[in-house]
Amino acid sequence: MSWMRRAIAVASAFPEDVPVGAVVYGPDGVELAAAGNEREATGDPTAHAEILALRRAAVLLGSWRLEGCSLVVTLEPCTMCAGALVLARVSTLVFGAWEPKTGAVGSLWDVVRDRRLNHRPEVYSGVLESECAALLRDFFARE
Ligand SMILES: [Zn+2]
């Protein structure tokens, strides 16, 4: 719960971007990296919160292998982010709200549980779901 509260807190780091927050925790539960969406801020189509948090955690650890790490994100990851967390060998994925339009952790695809891949993280979905969904609802209501 406190991990997801932290992800909710970083979701609105860039008020012009869709509020999604991601935090990577190490095997010992210490926060390694956190990010919000930075697509608008950087003009980078791959600057999703999860990608940025994974990159920063890998830089900190000096390795692309994030075995034992947990990725906590307010929204169900898309195909790109789900693919990236599998490649990074993240051990645990925790997400808040479901994303029926683009979600790749059960909604449209299930990239992280595809048995053809050699790594499948443990998944906890719907954590603080209503609060995570409210972030997005409030953002789109503002537009
Ligand atoms: Zn994504």
Image (spheres, rainbow, N blue to C red):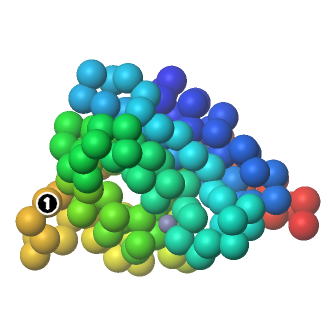
State whether label 1 is within 8 Å of ligand 1. Answer: no
Q: Position of residue 13 (x, y in %)?
A: 72, 44
| Residue on which the image places disc 1 | 119
Kind of residue sitting beneath label 1: His
Q: Locate the C terminus and report the quarter of the image it occupies.
A: bottom right
- Asked if residue 26 shows in the view, the reply is yes
The residue at 43%/28% (across/down) is: 31
The residue at 26%/53% (across/down) is: 64
Q: Position of residue 111 (x, y in %)?
A: 28, 71
**36 horizontally vs 127: left or right:** right
The residue at 13%/71% (across/down) is: 117
Relative height, residue 76 to residue 8 (above, below): below
Q: Find numbered disc 1 in the image and state the secondary structure of the residue it sits on.
A: loop
Foreground of the two, 62 or 117: 62
Relative height, residue 95 to residue 85 (above, below): above
Relative height, residue 103 to residue 16 (above, below): below
Q: Position of residue 8 (x, y in %)?
A: 62, 38
Relative height, residue 26 to residue 36 (above, below): above
Q: Quadrant of residue 141?
A: bottom right
- Asked if residue 127 shows in the view, the reply is no
Q: Position of residue 46 (x, y in %)?
A: 53, 71
**109 horizontally vs 34: left or right:** left
